[in-house]
Amino acid sequence: MKKNFYLLAVLFISSLTVFSACSDDDDNGGGDTEETVKDVMLDATAYDKWMYFSFKDGTSVAHEIEPVAGTYKGDISGTVMGQDQGTVTNLKLEVGRISKDSVSITVDEFSLAGRTISKFTAGAKIAADSIGWDLAGGEMAVSGMTVTPTTGNISLDSINITILIQPTGMPMPITTTYKGIIETRTGIDETSFNWDIALHRYDVKTNGASAVETTESDIKKVTAIPSSGYVADIKTDSLIIDNSGMMNNKVGYATSNINEVLNKGIEFSSVPMPPTPANWTMSNKVYVIKLKSGEYAKIKFTDYSNDADVKGHISFDYVYPFK
């Protein structure tokens, strides 16, 4: 009898242990568990790079920003000794990156001044100017003629350049002026890797997402997904990628996308100059991001410098997925 009672007691205790273990598993799998807040610091100090970050993978990668290279389409007009020689429309021109301060300029075949000008490629120096990028090339012999890109400018999505063309056997050069608009910009293929947000100094953009600012400063207190108010990225033409001539009012800009809502998380003012800690401010707000996939993440930017007080090292807390 005692043996039977002892056996029943063991079985009863064992059943309680099994029940307890099952209950813990249920809590971990879908009960009221505390969400995990992750923190990360990204080096976004480079003006000429975007630092891309994936919430899902927790990985980051930097890629250079290309402000001018690409394919343009526009019109080229010509004069000889001041006399109009007509205009060729819908002519393709390609700008290729050679080095940081030089590019190649390739112009498709066209006819002006009774001459057929074969497709040619010339080199040009490039530097940030007060408006856009300044172009100037040296004389070079190509395809039976001499071409000299004399003056030019690439501003935002347009190019305007003057090229002297001296065909062999022609006593006077043809002064051509090309004006075009960007069709395809050369640069990193942002669809070739996974990313959700990208940082550039104090700029933020998303991969087809939208964001809303909450009233909370504590990321753990944002427990519900906002139903409205999300703002998508917009196009900007004032992304600074070369500030080396800033004190002389010569700044290199690029066209890109930014998210104005997330940009409030880290704001930078151009006053006072030169930059001081007073230029940088944090909103101290939590933001909810609706990703392209339909998932959500929440984020709070917490600092704009590293332990050595170097600005542009952006720290943030985030929760992904946020449900």
Image (cartoon, rainbow, N blue to C red):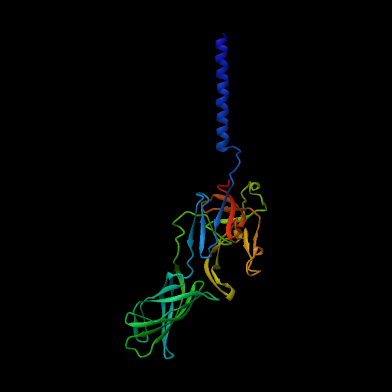
**Residue at the (57%, 32%) spot, across then down:** 24
Of residues 173 and 322, the one drawn nearer to the viewer in this rendering = 173
Q: Quadrant of the C terminus?
A: top right
Placement of 211 over or under 179, stated as above or below: above
Residue 6 point in image, percent of width and height:
57, 14
Residue 207 visible? The answer is no
Of residues 143 and 191, the one drawn nearer to the viewer in this rendering = 143
Residue lying furthest top: 1
Q: Is residue 288 left or right of residue 67?
A: right
Quarter of the rendering containing residue 23? top right
Residue 237 point in image, percent of width and height:
54, 69
Placement of 306 over or under 252, stated as above or below: above
Residue 212 point in image, percent of width and height:
61, 55
Residue 10 visible? The answer is yes
Q: Is residue 122 left or right of residue 237?
A: left
**Residue at the (49%, 65%) spot, across then down:** 65
Q: Quadrant of the N terminus?
A: top right
Placement of 113 over or under 293, stated as above or below: below
Quarter of the rendering containing residue 69? bottom left
Of residues 73 and 320, the one drawn nearer to the viewer in this rendering = 320
Q: Is residue 287 left or right of residue 162?
A: right
Residue 124 point in image, percent of width and height:
43, 76
Question: What count of labels does the image hold?
Answer: 0
**Residue at the (54%, 53%) spot, across then down:** 291
